[in-house]
Image (cartoon, rainbow, N blue to C red):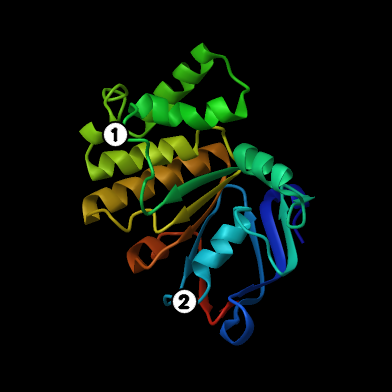
Amino acid sequence: MAANNEFALRCENLHRYLGRDDARVHVLRGVSFEARRGQVYAIVGPSGCGKSTLLYLLGLLDQPDGGEISINGQVMSNTDDAARTAARGEHIGFVFQFHFLMLEFSALENVMMPMRKLGRLTQEQMVERAHGLLTSVGLGQKTHRLGTQLSGGEQQRVAVARALANQPSIILADEPTGNLDVTNSALVFDLLTRLAKENGQAVILVTHNPEIAARCDLTRPMRDGLFV
């Protein structure tokens, strides 16, 4: 067994039910998973198998009905809302299929938002870091453009930079290339994985794209609430 500090995230025997009474569904049926730093994991499977439910649990956006989630060796699954919110801001970056940018703000301001929330950097440090991240995703010349002035592929690259803003140890991506054409899909995936490997971050992505999944370090197929 590898040392604990090799793993940014671990979960054991996760269960999650959705719905009530006769409509209650056992969505996750005892899922266990661990993610090493600097590795990229793909979770694949048919719609409704529990992929996104698992990702929301791992991102501390929801609580399991059973089982345990550890972030950097600290058990987080049964902590209160404030502790989970703080852990999300410090340790987890999200990239969703829909970029969820604040379109009335510039690319720079969007990337700075997580830093403002965490409150560790000065204004000058936030500007410098956001500019560096946007440069790393090929948008160094467009830092002051509003979200409405960026293409779909550029908006998703801003979302990647925003996910990396607080140097999280874990990146969770839910269909991050689902709305992009082939060229932009490859570009966003390459950026996400290269930057994460350079920074020693664990990347866990849910995807229906077999080409993207094939390029990950490890693919975990899901069916009926379990890895198969």
- Answer with the quarter of the image where residue 13 lies: bottom right
In the picture, measured across the screen, residue 13 lies left or right of residue 175, that is right
- What residue would you read off at disc 2? 48
In the picture, measured across the screen, residue 175 lies left or right of residue 84, that is left
Pinpoint residue 93: horizontal percent, then vertical percent. 53, 43
Pinpoint residue 122: horizontal percent, then vertical percent. 57, 14
- Between 78 and 14, the one nearer to me in the picture: 78
Q: CA distance from mark 2 to mark 1?
A: 32 Å
At x 26%, y 22%, the residue is: 141
Q: Amino acid at mark 2?
A: Gly
As drawn, the residue found furthest toward the bottom would be 22
Q: Is residue 8 visible?
A: yes
- Answer with the quarter of the image where residue 132 lies: top left
In the picture, measured across the screen, residue 151 lies left or right of residue 92, that is left
Mark 2 element type = loop
- What residue would you read off at disc 1? 147
At x 56%, y 83%, the residue is: 23
Mark 1 element type = helix
